[in-house]
Image (cartoon, rainbow, N blue to C red):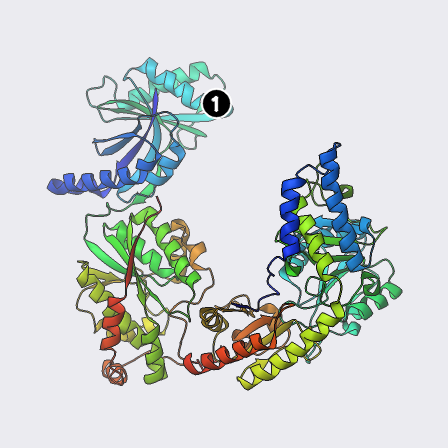
């Protein structure tokens, strides 16, 4: 009797002829995350990924935790596999649920027969197994609506599996099936959420951070790297670019009208990000903007920042309220890191009264007061790269 | 390197380093053991108790060693409130305390005590009158710091505590003396305190050791339970190397307090002149502790200035713990405008800080003022 983890596919099963590719990516992603924990056999069958440990002493709690963060899996459960006959199944049920059943007042059996050659139908199997349980635990009552214990039994092609109710996985589709994107990662709450939302739709996420020492500290950078590390539990390995941005910010402050500081800064960031994307074969930019959240995130402001971009800019948080974004960041575990209080490049010089409805030509005029091109090239030139992953 | 962050921590002195190495090499026994090795370790602790008691003006059995001033403050506040606050549920403190006191009072409030935090008046002063009038017959505990850690402001603890003790002899008094210890010539007797907290690493001992002086006869309830070490007040095997180092550091610096103070006052006077010339606003009052200077280069955020100075190998502290949204409650309580509080740095002198260190600082500040871009925004 062996414990293994069953991961149920979500959308992947709808992918028709491409399905194989999606399954392969998913399997690769899972393998990469759990490889450091020991030896496993991973196999796919009947819309399920089986994670079977090949060694003793593997921390299956941790394996489960990691698998629950892999995009492409909707449900997962820890199951015990056995032969497809009632006695063997009952034995496993007693072992796995004995204590719980002892202490419960009501239960139900939920049987699922994916192997249509099995001699009992699902309702028949539920009834028979339920009867066997009742004959051993006399105090129990069957309650199909609010049972204290639910015993799930699946009859699959390769055997019978007993487990409790499956928990929700991360959902989405496997990272690596939807192209590459470059996330502008500031250190706030929104950008990590945006990155993970795109990863959930299969995008391989790289991240770019703008640092402005001495206005921002080494700790601010360390914080953003920790954010990326946390994100990588969901997104997989992240290529992390750090752009030196001090000179550009100082020149904006020295040469441009105050109400346009943030907009001009964002335009320079977009320009630099776009060049990094082109240089590294990334297809799109990703930002954490949410419409109307701050002055630089009004539609008029985004029109002026998008004007410098030739590649698509994805803003998955655009229609979310702050509360909704925070809820996601809690789930991702990035919230507590995001709220650490260090200056970031966006808060260094903020105008008193920023323009909320800027005209593109006014911004372009304001920006033209200084030739930023040499500084942009220099910043791209001096960008540092490293790989970040949590495990 | 010019180290001007001595209120945050100090480098361990030679005496302390040697003492801790000695304790680890030669006296590794458990001070509670009955055999000779244990006794040897116990003697080192006794030495340190003596040294602390002498420096504070008490007797050695009144000293309890802790892991630092945070633990000392917690032990005193909760331990006194527990034993003396059964029927009297009012406790008094100030609005400018270190978090290890402020947070402890927050907890007391959650436990059902009525907490009164005396705020500075419009001149940024906490008067003895204000402290005394906050106390009533239902008050079981007053805790006030001697020197404020962010501005150097000296609170009138002696006059307040002595008047409180006259009016309400049953009210317990605790003083957080961390920034005054071995810097100001103050003894526990004149403080009229029942408990006094001090820290090791602010006086050139290693981190991880502090002490609480508890007046004989005053009962403090313990917070840790176990083997009953230190009269049952602080169970757990004593950290002999750190404690011995603490004792040696205290011995090294407990003489000449007045002379050092005089010297520091001169350096501070010079620093105030130079910093003012460099365009800084000085927040610290003239009669504050000379070891702490709170100043602001308005328009440049503390964190930015700190990193700029760091690049020149000059180490200071940002006056407010952080700037992004979270302002220093203490600086605000002292009545500093937001724009000033946002730009405040803390320059804290060591015993060896010279005028030419101040010259280097002032020159760096002038460069900062020129090269850093100022935000004229009063956030």
Residue position marked by numbered label 1 in the rendering:
A99
Q: Secondary structure at mark 1?
A: helix
Query: How packed is label 1: few (under 14 Cα within 10 Å), some, or many (20 or more)?
Result: few
A187 w.r.t. B272: above or below: above
Q: Along the horizontal axis of the image, is B62 left or right of A364?
A: right
B140 w.r.t. B311: above or below: above
On the image, the x and y values in percent for residue B354 come to 61, 74
On the image, the x and y values in percent for residue A176 come to 21, 48
The residue nearer to you, when weighing A125 against A386, is: A386
Q: Along the horizontal axis of the image, is A232 left or right of B197?
A: left
Q: Is residue B229 visible?
A: no
B378 w.r.t. B183: above or below: below
On the image, the x and y values in percent for residue B200 come to 66, 56
A106 w.r.t. A171: above or below: above
Q: Along the horizontal axis of the image, is A54 left or right of A108?
A: left
On the image, the x and y values in percent for residue A299 come to 28, 72
The residue nearer to you, when weighing B271 against B305, is: B271
Q: Is residue B218 visible?
A: yes
Q: Quadrant of residue B116?
A: bottom right
Q: Quadrant of residue B137?
A: bottom right
């Amino acid at each position: 009797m062996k414990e293994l983890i069953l991961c149920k596919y979500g959308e992947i099963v709808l992918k028709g002829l491409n399905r194989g590719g999606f399954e392969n990516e998913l399997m690769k992603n899972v393998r990469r995350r759990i490889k450091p924990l020991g030896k496993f056999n991973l196999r796919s069958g009947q819309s399920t990924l089986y994670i079977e440990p090949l060694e003793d002493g593997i921390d299956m709690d941790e394996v489960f935790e990691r698998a629950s963060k892999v995009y492409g899996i909707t449900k997962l459960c820890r199951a015990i596999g056995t032969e497809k006959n009632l006695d063997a199944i009952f034995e496993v049920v007693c072992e796995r649920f004995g204590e719980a059943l002892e202490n419960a007042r009501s239960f139900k059996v939920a049987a699922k027969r994916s192997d249509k050659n099995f001699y009992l139908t699902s309702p028949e199997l539920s009834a028979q197994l339920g009867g066997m349980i009742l004959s051993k635990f006399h105090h129990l009552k069957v309650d199909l609506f609010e049972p204290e214990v639910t015993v799930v039994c699946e009859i699959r092609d390769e055997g019978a599996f007993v487990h409790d109710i499956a928990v929700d996985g991360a959902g989405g589709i496997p990272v690596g099936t939807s192209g590459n994107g470059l996330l502008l990662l500031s250190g706030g709450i929104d950008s990590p959420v945006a990155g993970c939302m795109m990863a959930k739709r299969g995008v391989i996420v790289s991240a770019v951070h703008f640092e402005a020492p001495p206005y921002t500290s080494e700790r601010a950078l360390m914080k953003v790297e920790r954010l990326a590390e946390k994100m990588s539990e969901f997104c997989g390995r992240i290529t992390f670019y750090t752009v030196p941005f001090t000179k550009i910010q100082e020149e904006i402050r020295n040469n441009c009208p105050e109400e346009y500081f943030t907009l001009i800064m964002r335009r320079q960031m977009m320009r630099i990000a776009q060049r990094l994307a082109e240089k590294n074969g990334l297809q799109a930019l990703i930002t954490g903007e949410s419409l109307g959240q701050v002055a630089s995130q009004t539609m008029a402001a985004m029109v002026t920042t998008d004007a410098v971009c030739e590649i698509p800019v994805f803003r998955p948080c655009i229609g979310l309220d702050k509360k909704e974004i925070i809820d996601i960041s809690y789930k991702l575990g990035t919230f507590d890191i995001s709220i650490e209080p260090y200056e970031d490049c966006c808060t260094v010089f903020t105008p008193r009264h920023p323009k909320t409805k800027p005209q593109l030509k006014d911004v372009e005029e304001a920006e033209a007061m200084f030739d930023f091109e040499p500084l942009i090239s220099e910043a791209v030139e001096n960008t540092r790269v490293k790989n970040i992953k949590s495990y | 390197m010019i180290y001007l962050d001595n209120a945050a921590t100090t480098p361990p002195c030679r005496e302390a380093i040697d003492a801790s190495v000695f304790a680890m090499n030669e006296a590794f026994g458990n001070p509670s053991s009955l055999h000779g090795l244990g006794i040897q370790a116990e003697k080192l602790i006794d030495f340190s108790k003596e040294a602390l008691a002498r420096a504070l003006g008490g007797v050695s059995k009144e000293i309890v060693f802790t892991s630092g001033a945070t633990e000392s403050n917690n032990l005193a506040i909760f331990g006194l409130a527990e034993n003396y606050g059964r029927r009297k549920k009012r406790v008094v403190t100030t609005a400018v305390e270190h978090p290890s006191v402020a947070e402890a009072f927050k907890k007391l409030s959650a436990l059902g005590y009525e907490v009164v935090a005396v705020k500075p008046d419009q001149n940024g002063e906490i008067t003895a009158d204000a402290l005394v009038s906050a106390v009533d017959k239902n008050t079981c505990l007053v805790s006030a710091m001697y020197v404020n850690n962010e501005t150097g402001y000296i609170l009138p603890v002696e006059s307040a505590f002595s008047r409180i003790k006259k009016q309400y002899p049953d009210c317990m008094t605790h003083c957080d003396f961390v920034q005054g210890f071995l810097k100001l010539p103050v003894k526990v007797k004149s403080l009229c305190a029942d408990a006094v907290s001090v820290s090791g690493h602010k006086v050139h001992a290693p981190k991880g050791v502090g002490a609480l002086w508890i007046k004989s006869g005053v009962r403090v309830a313990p917070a840790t339970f176990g083997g009953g070490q230190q009269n049952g007040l602080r169970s757990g095997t004593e950290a002999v190397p750190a404690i011995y180092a603490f004792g040696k550091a205290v011995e090294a610096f407990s003489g000449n307090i007045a002379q050092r103070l005089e010297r520091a006052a001169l350096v501070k006077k010079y620093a105030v002149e130079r910093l003012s010339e460099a365009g800084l606003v000085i927040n610290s009052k003239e009669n504050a502790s000379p070891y702490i200077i709170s100043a602001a280069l308005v328009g440049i955020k503390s964190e930015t200035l700190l990193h700029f100075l760091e690049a020149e190998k000059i180490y200071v502290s940002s006056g407010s713990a952080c700037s992004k949204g979270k302002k220093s409650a203490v600086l605000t309580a002292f009545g500093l405008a937001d724009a000033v509080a946002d730009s405040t740095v803390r320059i804290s002198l060591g015993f060896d800080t010279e005028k030419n260190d101040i010259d280097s600082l002032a020159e760096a500040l002038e460069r900062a003022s020129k090269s850093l871009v100022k935000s004229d925004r009063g956030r």
